[in-house]
Amino acid sequence: MEVGLVGKPNVGKSTFFSAATMAEVEVASYPFTTIDANRGVGYVTHKCPHVELGLDCDPNNSPCQDGTRMVPVQLIDVAGLVKDAHSGRGLGNKFLDDLRQASSLIHIVDVSGSTDEEGNPCEPGEHDPRKDVEFLEEEIDHWLKGILKDNWDKVARKIEVSGEKLDKVLHERLSGLGISEGEVVSALRKVELPSDTTEWGEEDFFELAQAIRKKSKPIIIAANKMDMATEEDLRALEGSDRAVMPTSAEYELALRRAANSDIVDYTPGDETFEILQEDISKEQKDALEKIEDFMEKNGGLGVQKTLEKAVYEILDMIVVYPVENENDYTDKEGRVLPDSYLLRKGSTAEDLAYKVHTDIGEGFIRAVDARTDRVIGRDHELEDGDIIKIVSE
């Protein structure tokens, strides 16, 4: 699963990426600082089962901090998007190609209105961030429309002659974008299209592309640079039907760096922090006071909450812990609760087996719920926090 960070140039995408992953990337106040996509690992939090079990865990793929499991999520920070990107303007083709496998998108928006439509700095409030939301979604819709429409006359005639199902044809066209057949079917149900596919017009293709985008690549808005904005700015952006999270990626990055230097005690997503060093400079103290004030007003800094909302609410994911010994909750090396995996809600024991390894999925025999010691079948629907042993050939 991959979450894409999108937006026009110079709105703080790379700062958000750095804050979420602690990866060092170039950050500057001019357009197209990011040319090649930055890829890294962020984390969403989950209560580690070792607390309720009264054990000491020994994590492998996901660190545990004071009972909070940090579950890995792949993040991609792509080049900034400008108007008419779907036609190849700016780095448009590269931007859109980099987003092919993203399951959801976090749209980083400069809520303070201090960057114009091209990503150039301007006075705060000079640009309306609502326009950025509209143009980005339209660019992705036009991109999908172009893929759907390409050589459509030939495809439509093939459907008419062969009787092949429309959803299967569309899925085949879009499969390289990480779009499932189920998402295509769901999108088709949302739009009214001429039954004769040879009669589809520009508006039909655009409406279908829009429905597919909403279903396959849902978007959450990170209202970034909130430290420079007003409550009125935020309320204006919240006037849509999209989820909007007040965010200061710059403050988040500064606080995480301070935590890494043992200046503060801070767990990503917390609404407060504790200063550990008293002999810090006045500049550091003033900066931390600003961050503290922002956190009190906004319930945190927003980066972690945005990522978790994208994963847990927008994508509807759960966390499951596979083990090899259901009695000790260990793997073959004796590590307690070594791994945690994100799965879509509704996933089965067999889905988990394939997630762990293809060979385990193909050799699936049965599974065991480690908490209840109950044998479960391949179609058993998993629940958040389950600890599961997979028995495989």
Image (cartoon, rainbow, N blue to C red):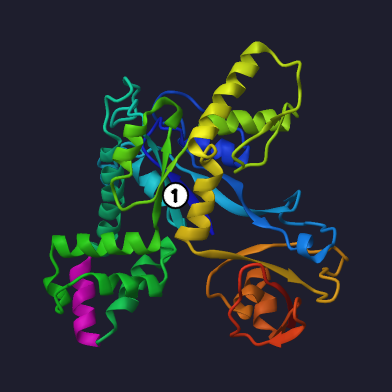
> Which residue of the protein is positioned furthest toward the top in this rendering?
282
Q: Which residue is mark 1?
A: 98
Question: Magenta-highlighted stretch: main secondary structure?
Answer: helix
Q: Is residue 4 above or below residue 132?
A: below
Q: Is residue 375 left or right of residue 289?
A: right
Q: Is residue 158 magenta?
A: yes
Nearer to us in this view, 250 or 164: 250
Q: Is residue 290 above or below residue 266?
A: above
Nearer to us in this view, 225 or 96: 225
- Say if residue 118 shows up in the picture: yes
Q: Is residue 344 above or below residue 275?
A: below
Q: Is residue 102 magenta?
A: no
Q: Is residue 257 left or right of residue 91?
A: right
Q: Residue at the location (61% across, 23% down)?
A: 288
Q: Which residues are magenta?
A: 151-162
Q: Residue at the location (65% across, 79% down)?
A: 361
Q: Residue at the location (41% across, 61% down)?
A: 177
Disc 1 residue type (three-letter): Asp
Quadrant where the C terminus lies? bottom right
Q: Residues within 10 Å of mark 1 (few under 14, many from 20)?
A: some
Examine the image and state in which quarter residue 300 appears: top right
Quadrant where the N terminus lies? bottom right
**Image coordinates for residue 197, horizontal then vertical, percent:** 17, 75
**Image coordinates for residue 322, horizontal then vertical, percent:** 72, 70
**Image coordinates for residue 303, horizontal then vertical, percent:** 53, 41
Nearer to us in this view, 366 or 129: 129
